[in-house]
Image (cartoon, coloured by chain):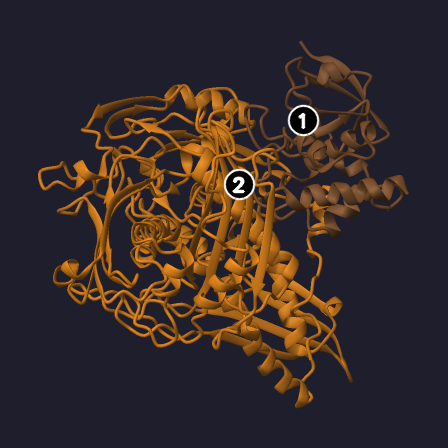
């Protein structure tokens, strides 16, 4: 019997959020704390020849200045440690004196006030030797391009290659061949809470960082690596997190905060250090959604069966790897859509440049690939005189289909049901707006569908940990749930608690959550890649089973600890790309009606119908909130937003020139259809949602 | 050259010695420790710092503390009365008008001003009223729903 799952439960943190009691990282304070400012390189590609910090050090209020020479192990990165913590003289890693994008960090100033720290940053003198700036990934891919990172013989960070069937043999069987180039822009996460954090060394000597992030244990690992100290000497705790969307997947202020308190302690100064980034620093200092150029050539026979897809994708990875390799994997997957295509040839490249690094952002490369794939299908349908939905029906994946990776799809492929439900709800017809509204106003209606994987995929070793303690005597009076999952606003903590209540068959009010703290939990993985509900649910089910067994054996408290490890995925074969890339998928389809003013170019998004198969909506209200929010971010991405770099310099560092949707820009109506076809591997059947 | 400023914040009076350039938002957050009022941008676009000044919604990053001398300020912390949440707080909670919650205090204070001038707004009027407050999570739909629900509750 369900006691908490599948029902609307209001957000557990909502009371504190509506009363102003929630503490975001910028709200944290400790007695005697110091303030830190970071000097950014401001150079897209330059080698530091000299640096003079003496004026900054003697500036009133300044306590200390730290540079590259102060970093024990001067390298970090989520997938590859390829970025200097601080760029400059005395770095103990090769290439550590070279700034590779404007947001590379070069010095930390710690002072009594933020104002004094900022003033002192301005007094640091740096001499740079300019190096060639490469901002075009196509230039960067050329064999004679200057190499941007040490120890590499190419600027191509990753090349994915898919070869299924043989596209060359079928073009002559195609009644229609569509060839097109798609370009997608850089996008800024623009979460409302700019990066901030507080660090201190606690009474046991543990370096503690309180910060907004998406994966506490990974942040802990990277801090420990840079400081050269054991993991258990570092603690990361997430207070309230003001949005993330992938933008907090990589490190921002975590390592430098830890470094500052660590070095200060060596000088005998045991004082906390706080940093708050301005909006400009946030826009400069963290990664963006990858811009892609996608060249696609697809062919279909007269019956609308897609016979071949040949696609080349080039992603601008920016200065460092971040999650580019994983994002590229998703784009590689999505660029042929949720379709069963017998002949596929894909070459996908992520390429280093001197632009702001690219990385995780909602959809993780999927939206870029899907934009090309769906546009191709629409063009083919139009060319063949077929209805856009009917064209899809003739090509959709189903259980047992080999995807473009040439391996059977995981059981539970429901894209056909999702497409049908969406078309039905929208009363789909291709011919709704055959005639113009007026001389300059036109209406149009579009259809698109896609799939989204759960997890980091492509062989990444996934895991998710949970612990449940059952307290009481004859009945369970209180459940303590320990879990490291981050709640970035998506409602994860409410959902984790619901799942624990349900797994133990106890009312939700009895669940108490201890979350997002490396000192109380083991690794639960990242709150990203649509993985948290799926992985956390399975870890909670496992922990509950153990705890309930202990309870029945009269253990008090009964404690269950469980590390969920899903089915192992595999990485792409170098030659053919053949692999079993993903554990599971969610499926989506949308119909959008727009009005276009052909004189001004203004596009008004009128109605959106969105169908999602979420397996089971653990909390329907939260699921709807995710869908509505994502549609508006996609609306911004498509129509409003464009993060502009010129010669490596950021031209849109404020909300005044990087426009995100306001309450007046959003679609007139969003209608949601939530399907609940259980995923065989999902907890309660849930698929990835957040 | 510091000046004395006397402000009534959430019904309690404070006299502070401030630099003339100090912003109201910093007075609230740093001098008075009221961190419910958030700072989300450098350019007065986001509205996260919205508070009521003599009943009117202002972005507290565009008001100098000295301009608030003798003023009556209400922040998110002062909206609940004797432990009873304000209808707007109730409805943002119930209608899921928030996700990360960072924009929420500013949204609620803006909505408070809007409803005091227009107790029965249309959805379009609400959307116009919120045009100066950014939210990146919700897509605004549930915020509008929450404000409608609060308006209806206040009217009854």
- The reply to whether residue A234 is in sight is no
Quarter of the view holding residue A290: top left
Q: Give the color of chain B as drawn.
A: brown
What residue sits 20% from the left and 59% below the top?
Answer: A174
Choose top left, top right, bottom left or bottom right for residue A198: top right
Q: Mark 1 points at which residue?
A: B25
Between label 1 and label 2, give the one nearer the viewer.
Answer: 2
| Other residues around mark 2 within 10 Å, as few (<14) / some (14–19) / many (≥20) | many
Of residue A367 and residue A297, the one placed in the foreground of this image is A297
Q: Where is residue A65 in the image (x, y as percent from the top left)?
A: 42, 30
Chain designation of label 2 = A
Q: In this view, does A544 lie above or below A271?
A: below
Q: Can residue A171 be seen in this view?
A: yes
Question: What whole-number distance in Å separates the C-alpha atoms at marks 1 and 2?
Answer: 20 Å
In depth, the one of A88 and A136 nearer the eye is A136
State which chain is coloured orange. A
Q: Is residue A671 left or right of residue B78?
A: left
Residue at point 41%, 36% (across, down) = A285
In the displayed structure, B27 sits above or below B89; it is: above
The percent coordinates of residue A479 (x first, y second) are 69, 72
Q: Residue at x 75, y 37 (%)?
A: B76
- In this figure, which residue is indicated by the disc labeled 2? A191
Give the farthest residue toward the bottom.
A553
Which chain letter matches label 1? B
């Amino acid at each position: 019997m369900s006691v908490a799952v599948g029902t609307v439960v209001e957000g557990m943190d909502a009371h504190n959020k509506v009363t102003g009691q929630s503490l975001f990282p910028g709200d944290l304070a400790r007695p005697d704390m110091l303030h830190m400012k970071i000097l950014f390189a401001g150079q897209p590609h330059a080698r530091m020849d000299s640096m003079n910090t003496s004026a900054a050090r003697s500036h009133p209020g300044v306590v200390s200045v730290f540079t590259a020479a102060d970093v024990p192990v001067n390298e970090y990165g989520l997938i590859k440690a390829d970025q200097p913590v601080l760029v400059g003289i005395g770095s103990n890693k090769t290439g550590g004196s070279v700034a590779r994008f404007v947001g590379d960090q070069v010095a930390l100033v710690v002072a009594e006030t933020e104002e004094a720290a900022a003033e002192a940053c301005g007094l640091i003198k740096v001499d740079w030797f300019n190096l060639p700036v490469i901002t075009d990934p196509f230039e960067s891919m050329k064999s004679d391009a200057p190499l941007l990172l040490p120890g590499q013989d190419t600027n191509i960070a990753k090349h994915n290659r898919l070869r299924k069937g043989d596209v060359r043999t079928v073009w002559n069987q195609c009644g229609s061949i569509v060839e097109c180039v798609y370009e997608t822009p850089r996008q800024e996460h623009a979460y409302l809470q700019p990066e901030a954090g507080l660090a201190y060394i606690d009474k046991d000597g543990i370096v503690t960082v309180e910060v907004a992030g998406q994966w506490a244990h990974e942040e802990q690992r990277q801090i420990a690596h840079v400081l050269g100290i054991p993991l258990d000497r570092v603690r990361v705790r997430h207070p309230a997190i003001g949005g993330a969307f992938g933008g907090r997947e990589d490190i921002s202020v975590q390592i430098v905060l830890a470094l500052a308190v660590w070095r200060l302690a060596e000088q005998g100064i045991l004082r906390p250090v706080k940093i708050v980034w301005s909006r400009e620093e946030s826009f400069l200092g963290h990664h963006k959604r990858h811009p892609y150029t996608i060249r696609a050539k697809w062919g279909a026979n007269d019956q609308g069966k897609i016979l071949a897809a040949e696609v080349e994708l080039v992603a601008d990875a920016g200065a460092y790897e971040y999650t580019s390799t994983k994002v590229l994997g998703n784009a590689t997957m999505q660029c042929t859509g949720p379709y069963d295509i017998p002949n596929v040839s894909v070459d996908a490249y992520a390429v280093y440049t001197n632009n702001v690094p690219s990385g995780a952002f909602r959809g993780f490369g999927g939206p870029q690939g899907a934009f090309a794939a769906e546009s191709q299908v629409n063009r083919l349908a139009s060319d063949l005189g077929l209805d856009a939905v009917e064209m899809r029906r003739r090509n959709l994946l189903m259980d047992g289909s080999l995807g473009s990776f040439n391996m059977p799809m995981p059981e539970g492929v429901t894209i056909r049901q999702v497409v049908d439900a969406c078309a039905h709800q929208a009363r789909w017809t291709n011919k709704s707006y055959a005639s113009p509204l007026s001389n300059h106003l036109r209406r149009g209606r579009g259809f698109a569908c896609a799939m989204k994987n759960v997890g980091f995929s492509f062989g990444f070793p996934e895991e998710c940990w949970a612990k449940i303690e059952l307290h009481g005597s004859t009945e369970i009076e209180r459940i303590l749930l320990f879990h490291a999952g981050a709640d970035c606003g998506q409602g994860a903590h409410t959902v984790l608690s619901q799942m624990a209540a349900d797994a133990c068959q106890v009312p939700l009010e009895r669940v108490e959550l201890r979350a997002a703290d490396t000192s109380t939990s083991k690794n639960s993985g990242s709150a990203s890649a649509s993985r948290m509900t799926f992985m956390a649910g399975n870890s909670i089910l496992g922990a509950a089973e153990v705890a309930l067994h202990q309870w029945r054996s009269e253990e008090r408290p009964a404690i269950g600890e469980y590390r969920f490890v899903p089915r192992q995925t595999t990485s792409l074969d170098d030659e053919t790309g053949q692999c079993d890339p993903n554990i599971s998928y969610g499926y989506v389809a949308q119909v959008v009606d727009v009005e276009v003013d052909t004189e001004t170019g203004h596009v008004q998004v009128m109605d959106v119908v969105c169908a999602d198969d979420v397996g089971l909506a653990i909390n329907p209200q939260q699921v709807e909130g995710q869908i509505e929010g994502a549609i508006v971010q996609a609306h911004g991405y498509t129509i409003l937003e464009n993060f502009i770099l010129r010669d490596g310099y950021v031209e849109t560092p404020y909300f005044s020139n990087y426009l995100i949707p306001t309450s007046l820009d959003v679609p007139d109506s969003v209608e949601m259809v939530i399907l609940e076809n259980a995923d065989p591997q999902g907890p309660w059947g849930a698929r990835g949602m957040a | 050259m510091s000046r004395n400023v006397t402000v009534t914040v959430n019904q309690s009076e404070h006299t502070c010695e401030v630099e003339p350039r100090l912003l109201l938002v910093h007075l609230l957050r740093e001098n008075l420790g009221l961190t419910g009022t958030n700072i989300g941008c450098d350019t007065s676009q986001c509205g996260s710092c919205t508070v009521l000044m003599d009943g009117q919604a202002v972005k507290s990053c565009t008001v100098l503390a000295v301009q608030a001398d003798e003023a009556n300020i209400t922040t998110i912390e002062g909206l609940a009365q004797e432990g009873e949440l304000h209808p707007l707080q109730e409805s943002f909670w119930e209608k899921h008008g928030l996700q990360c919650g960072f924009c929420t205090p500013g949204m609620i204070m803006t909505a408070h001003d809007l409803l005091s001038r227009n107790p029965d707004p249309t959805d379009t009027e609400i959307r116009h009223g919120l045009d100066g407050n950014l939210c990146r999570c919700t897509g605004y739909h549930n915020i509008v729903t929450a404000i409608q629900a609060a308006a209806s509750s206040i009217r009854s």
